[in-house]
Image (cartoon, helix red, strand yellow):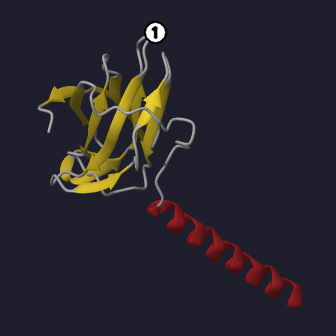
Amino acid sequence: MNFLKSVFFLTIIALSVSCENKEQKETEYHQPDLTSFYTSQNIESLNNKSFYVPVYSEIYSSTEKMSIQLTVTLSIRNTSISKNSFVKSVDYYNSKGKKIRNYLSKPIELKPLQAIDFVVTEADKTGGTGANFIVKTAGENSPLLQGIMIGTLNQQGISYLTEAKEIETY
């Protein structure tokens, strides 16, 4: 009988620890290691552009009361084979237009054909159905900016791809 009590007690502890880890993960977001991307170049005199990238961290299913959470990846790719691209800021906004987070503390540089990704996890419910990124760039060439969303509902896989739209630079 003592053996069964011990097994039961250990099972309860294991379950409570796994629940704590799940709660911790829900508040985290993916931040790539930017150390190798930071630039020391003065980019203030370069051509500046701003881009709106629509993403969907949540989509409706059946009705507006039932939704599916999605994992979002913002992919920024330098498509030039000879010139560097610079990214000044990457800001994530929710459906109400409120800034949720800024991913960059200082500008980064993408070498020719280099790419970087920023991920909003499926557990991050801050964005909503109208989430978006505003990305500010500098340089002669504009990087390719895409939003990739993926999720599952039961056995059904869901995926979307969106492209950026250049907006007024501010």
Q: Which residue is mark 1?
A: 82
Residue occupying the point 34% across, 31% down: 43
Q: Residues within 10 Å of mark 1 (few under 14, many from 20)?
A: few
* 97 versus 16 height, above or below: above
Asked where in the image residue 49 lies, by quadrant, the reply is top left
Q: Position of residue 105 (x, y in %)?
A: 40, 50
As drawn, is 94 to the left or to the right of 123? left
- Let me know if residue 160 appears in the view: no
Between residues 89 and 19, which one lies in front from this camera angle? 89
- Counting the numbered discs, the total is 1
* 103 versus 5 height, above or below: above
Q: Secondary structure at mark 1?
A: loop
Residue occupying the point 46% across, 53% down: 29
Q: Looking at the figure, which quarter contains the N terminus? A: bottom right
Q: Position of residue 151 (x, y in %)?
A: 42, 40
Asked where in the image residue 130 lies, by quadrant, the reply is top left
Q: Looking at the figure, which quarter contains the C terminus? A: top left
As drawn, is 104 to the left or to the right of 91? right
